[in-house]
Amino acid sequence: MAFTATDVKNLREMTGVGMMDCKKALAASDGDMDKAIEWLREKGMAASAKKAGRIAAEGMAYAAVIDGVGVVVEVNAETDFVGKNEKFVDFVKGVAATVASVNPADLDALLAAKYMGGELTVEQQQQEMVLVIGENIKVRRFARFAEGVSVPYIHAGGKIGVLVNLEVSGEATDKVVEMGKDLAMQIAALNPSFLDKSQVDQATLDKEREIQLAIALAENEKAAKPKPQNIIEKMVDGRMAKYYKENCLMQQEFVKDSSMTVEQYVASVAKETGLSISLKDAVRFEKGEGIEKKQEDFAAEIASLVK
């Protein structure tokens, strides 16, 4: 029986076993999915088949500069407890080191890369961690900056990982690195949608203006003394300026000194150090972000056990 790339992908998702091993299993089983799973189990590679389907929304976000390369990764596990496990943390750091050295194009390329330059791929090492720790573990995403000055920040032991990338005209001083960490901490705390107002696309601006205009008109209808249209337009302009301050990092109030914006803070550090400094990019990973966590009904679970 022939099998397709989709069959290989499905078997991989069902068992958590590497792509090449799934292909071998299907070839050895004439494309029969059930027999392929049995083949993998017999080879000791699918002992955690059931674990691979369980939701992994905990784990760790990690950021670091490794050999001058900035890296931020998220690796998920099922429980917060495992996120603090020394072996799991070492695995996460190994994944980051692999990203730094290999420069994978995407997640599939990372999973296929040799973990820490060793014999196993990242995907195979991930599977080893599943077997050792006893939970579903998944490398979820990564980002990498090879140019410029990268400054990492890890919040709450891995709940949030932030990597800030700066363009600096000369050698980055301690003051510049401190500034980078300040920006990373602000990003971790406030999670701005954009780094600068110049990044806000026109469609987003048009939609936000439409919303603010509708709110202003509704308020005006209820007012004892309705305002003319030109005043309403000015009100909307003011609210759009507030939108930038709330959603764009550089226009936000600097958390550590409310007398200035983040943009003004960066300018002040540039002036103090005599360097040209600009924020090139930043990435914020929050563990489990966007993953729908399973809601456990413990009462029902206990009731089922005592029947």
Image: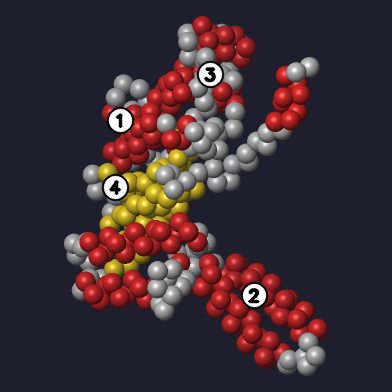
The image shows residue 205 at horizontal and vertical percentages of 59, 71
Q: Which residue is mark 4?
A: 65
Residue neighbourhood size for the residue with mark 3, other residues' Cα within 10 Å, grouped as few (<14), some (14–19), many (≥20): many
Q: Secondary structure at mark 2?
A: helix
The answer to whether residue 170 is left or right of residue 108 is: left
Q: Which residue is mark 2?
A: 209
Quadrant of res 67: top left
The residue at 59%/20% (across/down) is: 50
Q: Which residue is mark 1?
A: 116
Q: Which residue is mark 3?
A: 48
Q: CA distance from mark 1 to mark 2?
A: 50 Å
At label 2, the amino acid type is Arg
Q: Secondary structure at mark 4?
A: strand
Task: For the residues labelled 4 and 3, say whether their Cβ atoms are less than 8 Å apart.
Answer: no
User: The C terminus appears in which quarter of the rendering?
Assistant: top right
Circle 1 or circle 2, nearest the eye:
1
Residue neighbourhood size for the residue with mark 2, other residues' Cα within 10 Å, grouped as few (<14), some (14–19), many (≥20): some
The image shows residue 72 at horizontal and vertical percentages of 39, 46
Of residues 137 and 304, the one drawn nearer to the viewer in this rendering? 304
If you read the primary sequence from the N terminus, does the residue marked by circle 3 or circle 2 appear first? 3
If you read the primary sequence from the N terminus, does the residue marked by circle 1 or circle 3 appear first? 3
User: The N terminus appears in which quarter of the rendering?
Assistant: top right
The residue at 73%/91% (across/down) is: 227
Q: CA distance from mark 2 to mark 4?
A: 40 Å
The answer to whether residue 138 is left or right of residue 92 is: right
If you read the primary sequence from the N terminus, does the residue marked by circle 1 or circle 2 appear first? 1
Q: CA distance from mark 4 to mark 1?
A: 16 Å
Residue neighbourhood size for the residue with mark 4, other residues' Cα within 10 Å, grouped as few (<14), some (14–19), many (≥20): many
